[in-house]
Amino acid sequence: MVTTIDQKIAEYLNNWTIDGWPIGNLVLCIIALFLAVVLCGAIGIEREFRGRSAGLRTHLLVGVGSCIIMIISIYGFPGATEGKRDVARLVAQVVTGVGFLGAGVIMHRNGGGVRGLTTAATIWVVMAIGIACGSFNFFLAFAGTVLILAVLTVFKKVEERVTKYSAFIAVTAPAETPLLDIILTISKEFDCSIHSLSTELVTSGSSKAISLTFQVIFESSKERINEYIAKIEKEANTISIQIL
């Protein structure tokens, strides 16, 4: 059986005693909790910096809570025999529970857009980091955190370069306006395509208006979105236009 560095550290600390009192496991638990705070906090700060709904505190609570559950699974049932104790049972419930928590930060926008998937994934990931800390796999937790931060920062820039930019837009204009024709013409001019188009006739008293909600995908730079919206406002004499 291969012994890892983490196991060597855990065995060494577990043998610590002061005047015959075994304090090694207490020190080990404190190190695990401190590392969970640092590593999960680093991911939480990144989400907080980007203004996401689940930020530093949420990620800290999930990570530290998962670490505590893992420690309880290891040390919390001293009376149970080794054959009857299943340390993975509590952890399995954490994995399921955090999955539901992550689903709570996913928001569906008008027009079919979805936001919050990355934040939901980071909540699930800090749970895994907390479990790694609580099981005293410190190097795994550290390496995983570095990789995750790289995905959230470096890979985001790569993603922006290789993927197309899309936005959901809602436009309202007087009913007599050939709104769809105007949008299609402008979209061709800006080298972008239209998807998920829905139309609604809005009546307010004696006046009528047409409302279009659609997804626009830019083949070129996403910085042109403001020019695109301004052009629609000018050509269609819009009542309102907004990015959803």
Image (cartoon, rainbow, N blue to C red):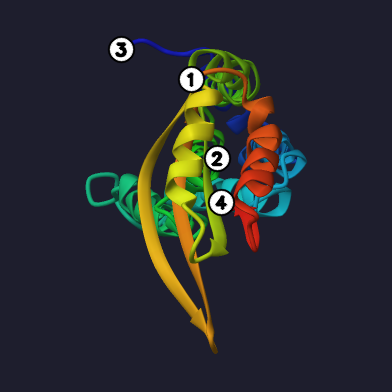
The one nearer the camera, 210 or 19, is: 210
Residue under circle 4? 68
Q: Secondary structure at mark 2?
A: helix
Name which residue lies at 56% across and 35% down: 133
* Amino acid type, residue under disc 1 in the picture: Thr
Disc on the earlier residue, 2 or 4: 4
Judged by depth in the image, the label closer to the viewer, 4 or 3, is 4
Q: Please indicate whether residue 3 sits to the left or right of residue 32 in the image.
A: left
- Give the mark nearest the N terminus, 3 or 1: 3
Q: Label 4 vs label 3: CA separation?
A: 27 Å
Observer-nearest of 31 and 233:
233
Q: Which of the two discs, 1 and 2, labels the residue nearer the N terminus? A: 2
Residue 35, position as x, y percentages in the image: 68, 34
Q: Helix, strand, or loop for circle 3?
A: loop
Characterize the local packing of mark 2: few (<14), some (14-19) or many (20 or more) Cα atoms within 10 angstroms: many
Q: Amino acid at mark 2?
A: Val
Identity of the residue drawn at 46% across and 13% down? 4
Label 1 crowd (10 A; few <14 / some 14-19 / many >=20) = few
Would you name the residue on which mark 2 appears? Answer: 126
Q: Earlier in the sequence, mark 1 or mark 4?
A: 4
Q: Residue at x 63, y 55 (%)?
A: 241
Height in image: 81 above or below 17? below
Q: Earlier in the sequence, mark 4 or mark 3?
A: 3
Q: Position of residue 164 (x, y in %)?
A: 49, 23
Locate residue 55 relative to residue 128 in the image: left or right: right
The residue at which mark 3 appears reads as: 1
Give the Cα separation between the discs numbered 2 and 3. Answer: 29 Å
In the image, is residue 78 above or below residue 7?
below
* 169 to the left or right of 48: left
